[in-house]
Structure formats: structure tokens, C-alpha cells
Image: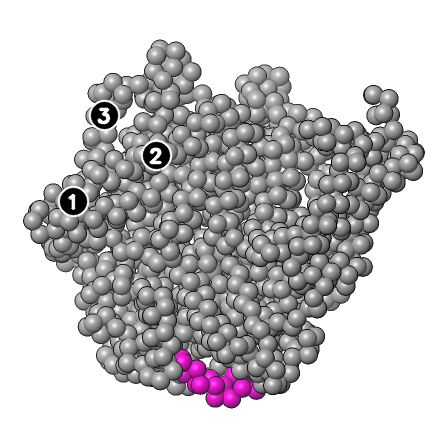
Amino acid sequence: MEALIELVQYILQNVINALQRGSFYAVISIGYSMVYGVLMLFNFAHGDIFMVGTYIGFGIATLFLALFAGFLPGPLIFLATVIVTMFLASWVGVFVEVAGYRPLRSAPRASAAITGLMIGIIFETGILILLGAKRLSFPPLMESVSYKVWGIYLTNVKVIIIIISLLLMLALHTFIQKTKWGMAMRAMSYDFLAVPLMGVSINVIAPLTFAVGAGLAAVAGILYGQAYPILDPYMGVIIGWKAFVAAILGGRGSIKGAALAGYLLGFIEIFVATIFPSTLRDLIAYSIILLILTYRPRGFFGMEHSTKLRL
Amino acid sequence: MRKITVLIIVALAFALAFSSPAFSARKTVIKIGINAPMTGDIPKVGEGSKYAALLWLEDIEKAGGLEVGGKKYEVELVIEDNESKAESAVKANMKMITQDDVLAIVGPQSSKQAVPAGEVANKYKTVMISPWSTNPATTMDRPYVFRGCFLDPFQGPVVANFITEEFGYTKAAVLYDVASDYPKGLAEVFKAAWEKKHGAGSVVAYESFTTKDTDFSSQLTKIVKSGAQVLFTPQYYNEVPLIVQQAKDLGWKGPIVGSDSWGSAETVELCGEACYGLYFSSHYAAAGAKGATKAFIDRYTENYGYIPDDVAALTWDALKLAQQAIQDSGKITGRIEKDRAAVRDSLAKIKNFAGITGNMTFTEEGDPIKCAVIVKINDNGEYEFYKSSCP
Amino acid sequence: MEIAKKFKNTFSTVPMLSWLLGTLTAVAIEYFWGYDYISYYLGLSKIPVLFGALIMLKEPMMIPGAIGYDLIVYVIPILLIAKTTAFFTNPVAAILEKMPLWFSVILHLLLFYYTLHLWAGINDYRNIIVRLTLISIILTISINVINGYQGEFSCSHPGFMAIGAYVSSALTLFLFANDKMFGTALLPQELGPWGFPFILIAGGIAASLGSLLVAIPSFKTRGDYLAIISLAFMFIVKSAVENLNVIGGARGMGGQPEYAPLPIIFIWTIICIWVIHNFVTSIMGKALNAVRDDEAASESMTVKTRKTKMTAFMFGAFWAGIAGGLFAHVIAYINPGMFSINRLAEILAMVYFGGLNSIVGSIVGAVSINILGEALRPLELFKWIIIPLILIFVMIFRPYGLISFKEINAKRLLRSKHKREQGV
């Protein structure tokens, strides 16, 4: 009996771990998935947009803490940081769209993927040149408190990360489903060519999509900074590629799918490392993904849609 | 057609007129190559190497050049970025040796670049001193390759002994990066040393992750559950703060011990109070240093605004070693192959070289016999000398 | 503009043979007089390595000297010799035109190789750049089969390369070298260079077998799933190698014997270009293009789409394996970290920069990215701003890459240029 309880506690502990990890993958891969859904493009700069967003968040957080710490309550500073960072980072998204993707509207999709990749490299090197090789430590926006609930270790940061991620996704879902802009985005993902004829300009929707994705990535960045407070210019690369995996695993243009796949990726990574020797983690985790795709080649919520390449 | 001809002639005349040192004889300049990771995974390591090299060059320039056999020679540094990639390190070495005619090379720092780059240096009979590479393969069977630090097979047992003596623990856990050769090698050595001491199975958790991971929660949960008393993690400075923080969040109470890769000033800067009171093995300890070591630390801090990490100190030593070897060789003939061989011979002969990271004498393989230091991170966040362990 | 037109007119009668002769003369001039005379009188301390690019960026004072060197050694001799020898090379080319094509091609290639050999022989840094560039050419052409001719987006090339590199290194170390990993050699070491082609092919076959792991699940349906299946495959290969301590794990595998000098790599590159050229212009290649443009339509025209796609994919993987094997024997050290995201970005950059659906494009892409990467070394960090910017501009102005949808026409390239003057 004792052993059973311990096992349940152990599993629950890892569920919490996986939820935290999965939250980042989910939020970041949603940004990926939106661009992929609306424009049918791989946004290979997304990982680096996330990185830039985190750096912006770092700057804003440091500034606000210096200005307001002491006479404004902590949660308010946090909120202000999130809002300002989101606003600024969404312009990074717009910039990427205008500079790297707009000139390639009629080009093959892969070429746009390459410009995305290259913009990402420019961001990485640019940050390295601007700020030097020093790694930065993200200032804590809330004091970390550990709890032990029924043998499970929790911190308030973990809980807040999980809740805020869920809230963000809910907000996005409402935005996509209920607002006019969201409707335009959905329409665009159904028919890339006909919708512009209906008076919805792609030159508005595309930057908007990038902006929303970048804003989400920036919030993820701030949260990331709270959980893993070390910033370096190459931090977005691996997480970007993993979000890419999650976005496609979720199915084309499916926000729900991307979120689910993000969490799934978190769970796979954590539980594979828990059950098997952790040296085999990547090997087994990606083999599982390979298997899933073999049996569900359209991902979870992929539309029955011609995915013909525009080449 | 005539226009083109005229254009070419004008360009040629221009070229001849303006090539400033035209018709001057080629000067003999002593060139030292630095092969460092300026971009890629560990740009900070590259920066430290570069800064240390610049300080060294400043000294030489102040003295009006390097005096060899009674004659002063101008010294030039050739700093090449190896992008933290093996093939780039090979190309950089190839370029410095065959194109720039360097007399000696300092670097690359990480073993994954130093091992292949050492092959090139050895093939072209050019002295290469890797300040930081602890993998035995770097210098093995390569008469022209040296290193400035101790090896993994030495460091692992030092840490295992230290933990046993200091805390009297018998159960240890190891967390390391499986995709990076340095942590992996050291983790294996430590495991072997620990199990030799405490019997098979005394390493109760042997967990790994992959480079660039930031979440270690499942591994740490496993480690906490395994009942280990001490956690050994031979990771780089960018992962240590995360590991320490997450371990505490997941209820880890025991000490965490590290290796020389913790030795960057950034470890404490990024980690903050969570790291105070932890121990690691290193090449030198910055806090409480005396003499030349202190002079170097002060000068570096003054110039670049932070306390030099072990890479910078080891690079400085490697450059001083190269300098000593060049001076000992007695004469610069200007025939590069001959000079390189002479430098190699005199470097191998150096006895009891007093470096800022300790005294060094080279073995047959080109590895120095030197002491390891156990450093404690004190309550001011400084690296304090705690103990030293000599072979 | 006027000058450019005149220039073009003057040199339009010069056949390939003359250009090659001109280049050969230029390289010979550099070889014999470059160090002792030309660079000496121009105040350069050595022969500039990549047409002076490194010196120019490092020491602006040297720019006139380096340009002067380029003019004296390369530009003037090439133009002069090309123009003056045209009177006899044109008839020669006309004679060659009447002979079988392969004869003429081999003759030109020999001339070209000799030039390259001389150029690379000046110092070993040039030599290694040339060798790595040739390997990049093989890689780029092989991924072009998949991403260009087949129109998929595959990310697994680093994985195939890793398989090829590891299989061939393990075989050479096991069979022909005394090393720590596998002990003494099984076969006499003298046999090594002769066995090497077979070992490389074994590596290629292993890579193409590995590609089945990607091909079988992903070619059931059409779509972007290949992108992540192949990405997952790349991570799987890397992780598997890291866990295999028999072949060194993360520590890597070193000490491969030097079986890949310049001539060997050159021959392999030529074979690769020839075979892939034949493949893509064959019926299979046409079927591949048909599948890319409209899968349903080509299926109805009796093209076996799945089989076509699988074959092409395995074929591309095979050559990536060969490239990996050669790479391992040039650097003489491999570790799993070499075959990861960075390598992928590099390969993708080369193929899309050069141009899809074109072997010439791939060659141009591989050569330019490799040369740029070396030539901009003195810029340090800014190199990684400039190269991506160049790529972005190329993508914006030429979305399909520099030279796309073009095939080599050896006959046209090598023909005599006499008739041009009559306005043909």
C-alpha cells in the first residue's frame, strides 16, 4: 500500500513536471501553427522570435522592477511587463512577416522557410553582438515559494505558468472563434486565394497572424524566464524545432491540435526519461512521434485538405 | 576593349603605387594562433580566451616585442573563430598553420574541437596547446600537442575522494549531458571511481539529458527518489544554475558537487544564493589568490569588468608556456618548420613552470602534472580555495 | 553597359577549352612566381589565399596590393590567354565535337582537374576548402533530388550523412587501421585505399536503408509530414549514435586513415554529378517531376507514385551517405553533434540558395556558401549577419534560387564558338 501511494505520488510529480514543460511547447507551437495554418508556411524564425521576445521581456522586467518595485504590488508589475512585452514583441513578428515573408508571397514555400531560418540567424548574431557573450539572468517577477502537497513538490511559479498558459490559449481560442479578425484568419486558412477577393487583405491578416504568434511567444518567454532564468542568444533554436514538430503533429491549422501536441511532447519527454534510462530519452521520444505519424499521418486535427505544395 | 585595357592598367598602377610596404623585405614576425569558439554554444569561453590573449599581447608590446636569442621580434596574434564546430576548428588550424605561418597555436578549448584540431597540428608539426581540453585523446600519441590542464581520469577520483572524506557519504547520484563529450567522460570516470570506493551500485542514479535542455525535472525527480546523498553534476556554467534551482524546487536537500566546468564567474552570477556553499573541483580559485595569480585577476577585472574564469587563466598560462618555449628555443631562424620543431622540443623540456593555475611539468604525452583545487562558493559568492589535491 | 556589351562580344568566340587554358596559365603563374615575385613586389606577406578576400577584410591597407595581385595573376592572364588561344582552340573544339561526347568531357575534366590540383596545391588550407566544397556539392545535389526534383521538404540529410560517416569510418577502422576502438587491422593496410570505394558504397547503402524508416511512413500520403518525420529521424540517429559507446558515443570517433585526398573526392563528385544527372533526366526523373507537379494526374498516367518517390528518396540518401563517408575521412574525426540542426541549416541554405531542380544550381550554391563562409572569416561575428542577408536577398529576388530548373548541357558548353560570329 505504502509503495502504491509512493508510486502515485511519483507519477503525479511527473505529471506536474510534464504540464510545466508542455505549457511552453504548447504556447510556442500555437504561434507556429497559426502561421502554418493561415499562410501554409513554416515559420522557421519562430524559435528566434521567442528568443527575442524573452530578451525584450528581460529588458522590460528589469526596467519596471527598477522603476516600480516597492510601491506597486508584484502581480501588477508582472501584468504590466507581460502587456508591454507582448506589444513590443508583436512588432518583431510583424517585422519578420514584412521583411522575410511578404516579398515571397508568390514564391515556393520552402524559399520563405529559408528566409525565416536566415532571419533567425540574424537575430541570434545580432543579440550576440549587441549584448556580448554574457548570459543574462531573468529577474524574478514573483518570489518563488515551494509547497509540499501530499508528497508532491510544487512551486507557485509552476502553478502560475500552467494557469497562465491555459488562460492564454483560452483567450486565443475566443479571439479566433468570436472576433471578426479571427474569422478572417480562419477563412484564410480555408482558402488562401478566394478570401482576398472577399475584401480581406492578406497584407493585414498575415502580419496579424505573425504578431499574435510573436506576442504569445513573448509571454511564453517571460514565463520561461521565471522557470529557467538563463537567457542566451541560441536558446530559441531547439525549442523552435520542437514547436515545429508539435505544430505539425497537431494538424494543419489546428490551434487545439497544436496545444494538445505541445502538451503531448512535454509528457513524452518527461515520462520517457522517467520510465526508461534517460540517456535513451530522445531516441525513444522521437520514435514514438514517428510511430504516431505512421498511423495518423494527418496529425490529430488535420483537415482533410489538399496540402499541395506551391512549387 | 581599349577601355578595359586602360582600366586594367590604371588599376595596376594604382595597386603598385598604393601597396604601402611595397618592395620592403618580408619581416620575421612571431605569430601565435588562437583557436577559440567566438560563436556557437559557448561564446563566453571564446571571449575569455580572446581577452586573456589580448592582455598577454599587451605585455609583449609593452616590452617592445618578444626577445629570442638577444633579438626582439614583433608578435602578432591570429584569432580564429571555430564556431564551436569540429570541422571549423580543423579549418581554422589548417589556415593558421599553412597560410598564416603561426609558430604555435593556443586552443581549441573544448575537447570536441581539440581532438580533431590536434590531429592537424600534429600532422603539420606545429605546437598546439589546448588550455582546457581534459579528454585524454587530445594529446595521446601526438608529440606536438600539449595541454594546460589536468585530465578527466585524474579529476574524477579527486572529486569522489573529496566527497567521501568531507561528507562520508556512500550513495551518489550523477546528472550529466549525454550529448557532450566532456560531461559524459567525466561522469563515467566519476562513476567508476565512486563504485570502486563504495562498491557496485553505490551510484544510485545515473541520469542524463541532452545539450540545450533546460528542464531536468524528471531526471531530478528520479534522483530525489533514489535516496542519493550527494549529486555530482559535471555541467557547464549555463546549466548549473538551472540544475541547482530545480533540484531545490523538487525537494533535494543534499549537497551538489561540480567539476572544473563550473569555474566561470557566471555560474554564481546566474545562480545567485542558491549556489552558495557548494563545492567544485577546479584549476584555480580566484578568491584569496596571491602573487601573479592575483595580479592577473586584478588586471583582467579592471580591463573587462568581470573576474576571469578558469578558461581565461588557463589560456594565459598556455600563452606564457608558448612564450617560454619560444624563448628557450634560443633562436628564430625564419624557417618556420625548423622553428616549430625547436619550440616543440623546448616546450617538452619545461620543468616546473610556475603558472597562475599552478606548477606544471609535462609528461611524455604532453599532459601537465598539476594539482586540482577544490573550490567552495562562499557566502559572498566568491570562489574560495578549500582544499588541493595533487597527483 | 557599353563596356559590358563590348566585353561580351569580344569573348563570345572563346570556347571552354580556351577558358580552361587561361585559368591553367593563371594558376601556373601563381604556382611558379606567386610567392617569390608577384606577392613580394606588391608588399604582400604571402600568396593571398582566397583571391585576397581574407587580407582585404583584415587589413584595408592591403586592398590595393591584393587587387593588384588578382589582376596580375588571374584576370589579365585568363582574359589574355583565353582570347589569344581561341584561334586554335576553336578548331580543336570543332574536332572534339565530332568525337564521342564522353571523350571531350573527360579531356576537359582532366584539364580542369589539373588546374584545380595546382591551385589547391599551393597550400593545404586551400586544399581542405576545395575538398570540403566538393563534398558539399555532393550533399547539395543529393538533397536537390528530394527537395527539388521531388518537391518534398526533407530535413533528414544530416542523419543520412551521419549513417554514411559512421558506417564507413567503422569499416575502415575495423578493417584497415590499428586503433584503440577496434584493435588491430583485419586486412593488410595497403589494401585500404582500394577497399575504400566499397566501404563508401556500403555507407551509402546503409544510409539509403535508413531512409526507408522515413520513406515508408511518410509516403503513404502527401504533405508536410515528411518534414517532421525526417526531422524526428535526424534526432533519432543523433541520439542513437550518442548511446552507442562501441563507436565512441558522444566522444566521437577519430583516427580515420587518409583515404580521401583531392583526386579521390574529385572523382566521386564527378561520378555523383553524372549519375544524378542521368537519374533526373531519365524516365524515372520525369516521373518524379510529374509526381511533384500533380500526384493524382501522374498516378492516372500509370506512374507508380509511391515507388517513384521511395526510389528517389533512397537515391538521395545514398549520396548523402557517400558524402558523409568522405567527410569523415577528410576531417578524420566525427561526433554525433556534427550531424544536427546546424548542419541541416547549412545544407538547406546551400540547396535553396543555388536553385531547385538544377545540378548547376546546386554546384553554384555549395561553392558560394562554402567560399563565403571562409572568405568572410575576418569579419568574425558579422559574418553571420552578412551571409544570411545575402541569402535573404537572393530568395527575394530569385525565389527559386540563383539557377533553377536548368540542366547541364555538356555538348553546348564545350562546343566550338566559331559560328557565333555569323550570328547563329
Q: In which quarter of the image is the C terminus of chain B?
A: bottom left
Q: Which of marks 3 and 2 is in front?
A: 2
Task: From the viewer's side, name the closer residue of A204 and B65.
Answer: B65
Give the residue drawn at x 69%, y 61%: B22
Q: Mark 1 lies on which chain?
A: A
Mark with earlier residue (2, 1)? 1
The magenta stretch spans residue B353 = yes
* Residue A301 against residue C62 in the figure, above or below: above
x and y, in percent, of residue B174 in the image: 32, 66
Residue where numbered disc 2 is placed: A93
| Residue C196 in sight in this render | no
C-alpha span from label 3 to label 1: 23 Å
Q: Residues within 10 Å of mark 1 (few under 14, many from 20)?
A: some
Q: Residue at label 3?
A: A175
Residue occupying image coordinates x 28% and y 74%: B383
Q: What stretch is highlighted in magenta?
A: B345-363
Q: Nearer the viewer, residue B360 or C250?
A: B360
Visible in this render: residue B38?
A: yes
List the residue tagged with mark 1: A78
Q: Nearer the viewer, residue C383 or B149?
A: C383
Residue at disc 1, secondary structure: helix
